[in-house]
Image: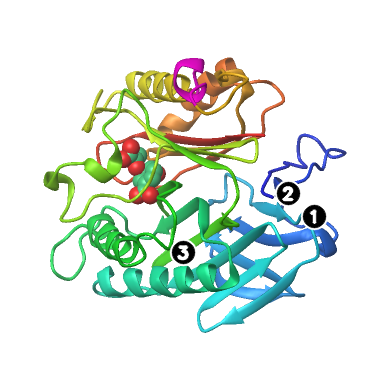
Amino acid sequence: MPSFVDLRNSPSEIRPNIKFEQQGEHSDSQNILARVAFEKNGFAPELHKGVPTLGVPMTTETEPGFQEVFAASGPVVAGREGNLVYAVDGRHLFCAVQVVERDIYRDAARIAYDSAFELATRLGYPNILRMWNLVGGIIDDNADGVEIYRDFCAGRSEAFALWSGRILHIPAATGIGTRGNGVYLYFISGRADAEVHHLENPRQTPAYHYPESYGPKSPSFARATFADGILYISGTASILGDETVHKGDISGQVDVTLENIATLISTENLGKVRPEGGYSLQDLDLIKVYVSRPEDIPYVRSRCKEVFSPDARVVYLNVDICRPDLLVEIEAIVQ
Ligand SMILES: C=C(O[C@@H]1C=C(C(=O)O)C=C[C@H]1O)C(=O)O
């Protein structure tokens, strides 16, 4: 199952699930389901010593690279089918695919998801838990003058529609810019009988109900997924209802983003599916903070230091966010 460990901060702690590792550190590959290297240049998904590995162009010289490591909970079988690289461990599937740079993404995004969903259902892991969509040039226009994020969302939405009923639900996700080109997407999914709950946020319109003014097909994601005791919090930004609030104001956007997460994980909301109740911001871990203007990073970092636990593993990435008016976005896991 996924977890993150940042060996920069806690060298002795390697829990199961997802971890953050410093670039160059390598866990015993026997226990690894997959690795995502956050680095300057990126590389296509491949099997590296039998482990699905991809490089995503997300860091700069000023932020050190790190790896997101998905630990396995059983013996791993890994493989490659066409453009897909994947691994299963009896409980989870990890799958990654790259869509290389092109004029228009809609068809290629649909095909990439379609083939990934076909694999997931065939292997018996149709319960998608968490997806990451890293979209180069996310707020630039494609060859038709359509914003690349909207272009991508249209293809993704078509794939979910095609697989409706077989891919069980729309999960937590992140859709974010990169410092490179093309789209990298990866996800983890569970067995059909896994206990999985997808959550919405009472302060926000469900993304799949966003009005058409945000694009021809609305984004396909839930605000959080709670599965096997792990809470996956989607990329969350300064959006109330469907509208960006505090345009141009980093301090206001950080406040609303944190309030949105606090409400999402509160006992009132998460407690509907988690008998023990909710969480607070102090419980968040494996936090990725996306900041679109580099000059805002010191401020955002200082705010995050105040609100998150000193033990939380946090990384900061200077990339574009899916709307030009969003300055900050935060995702996290509680496990
Ligand atoms: C910030 C938002 O959306 C972003 C885009 C997502 C996607 O398209 O998968 C998921 C979460 C966020 O990364 C939002 O609409 O609130």
Q: Earlier in the sequence, mark 3 or mark 1?
A: 1
Tell me the quarter of the picture where residue 308 sits: top right
What residue do we see at 29% from left, 50% from top?
219
| Circles 3 and 1: CB atoms closer than 8 Å | no
Q: How is the rendered protein coloured?
A: rainbow
Give the residue number, with chain letter if any, for mark 1: 25
What residue do we see at 76% from left, 67% from top?
76
Q: Residues within 10 Å of mark 1 (few under 14, many from 20)?
A: few
Q: In front of the other: label 3 or label 1?
A: 3
Q: Residues within 10 Å of mark 2 (few under 14, many from 20)?
A: many
The residues tagged by marks 3 and 2 sit, at their Cα atoms, a distance apart of: 21 Å
Q: Is residue 260 left or right of residue 39?
A: left
Question: What amino acid does circle 2 point to?
Answer: Gln
Element under label 1?
loop
Tell me the quarter of the picture where residue 135 sits: bottom left
Give the residue number, with chain letter if any, for mark 3: 184
Q: Which residues are magenta?
A: 265-272
Give percent across and percent down for residue 328.
39, 33
Viewport quadrant of the C terminus? top right
Q: Is residue 28 left or right of residue 111?
A: right
